[in-house]
Amino acid sequence: LAAGLGTDDDDDDDNGGKDLAIGSMRREAEKASCAMAAVSFGKAVLDEASNHLMPNGKQCQIRAGVHTGDVCSGVVGSRMPRYCLFGDTVNTASRMESTSLPGRMQVSEETQSLVSELISPSERALDGKSYDGSV
């Protein structure tokens, strides 16, 4: 997975840094694609949750937070191994989720700039960052 993220350093020909520019554009396109997938998934989860009732008879309302950036991942533990994500991006997304309103998704400015065409003006909250689960 990580091999596709860098430039091809095995080329001996000097092409004036074009590989770096192409690699950078590919990473930006991948970043936008991942952000769109995360927001689309969040919207689908919010919509699905709203179709279920809790044992107390109230509508299920979950919170979601989305942020775009670098992460580090790995398996932690030997007796009970777990796959974990680490980094400021994970912490920011967690804060976005915990400060969101029930039944809503809060999206960071960086992610919003990548997915602006995916979010209609009617879904935007007054702060410009928190989005309704309805489509």
Image (cartoon, grey):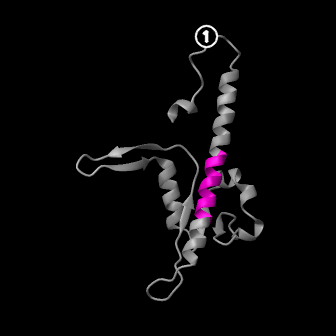
Question: From what the image shows, is residue 15 above or below residue 113?
Answer: above
Q: Secondary structure at mark 1?
A: loop
Q: Which residues are magenta?
A: 32-43
Q: Residue 69 in the image: x percent, y percent?
A: 56, 46
Identify the residue position indicated by label 1 in the image. Answer: 12
Q: Residue 12 in the image: x percent, y percent?
A: 61, 10
| Residue at the spot 57% in from the left edge and 33% down from the top edge | 5
Check residue 87 for magenta coloring.
no
* Left or right, 46 with reference to 54: right
Rendered image quadrant of residue 40 = bottom right
Q: Amino acid at mark 1?
A: Asp
Question: From what the image shows, is residue 58 above or below residue 125?
Answer: below
| Residue at the spot 75% in from the left edge and 70% down from the top edge | 122
Q: Residue 64 in the image: x percent, y percent?
A: 54, 65
| Residue at the spot 22% in from the left edge and 49% down from the top edge | 79
Quadrant, the C terminus: bottom right
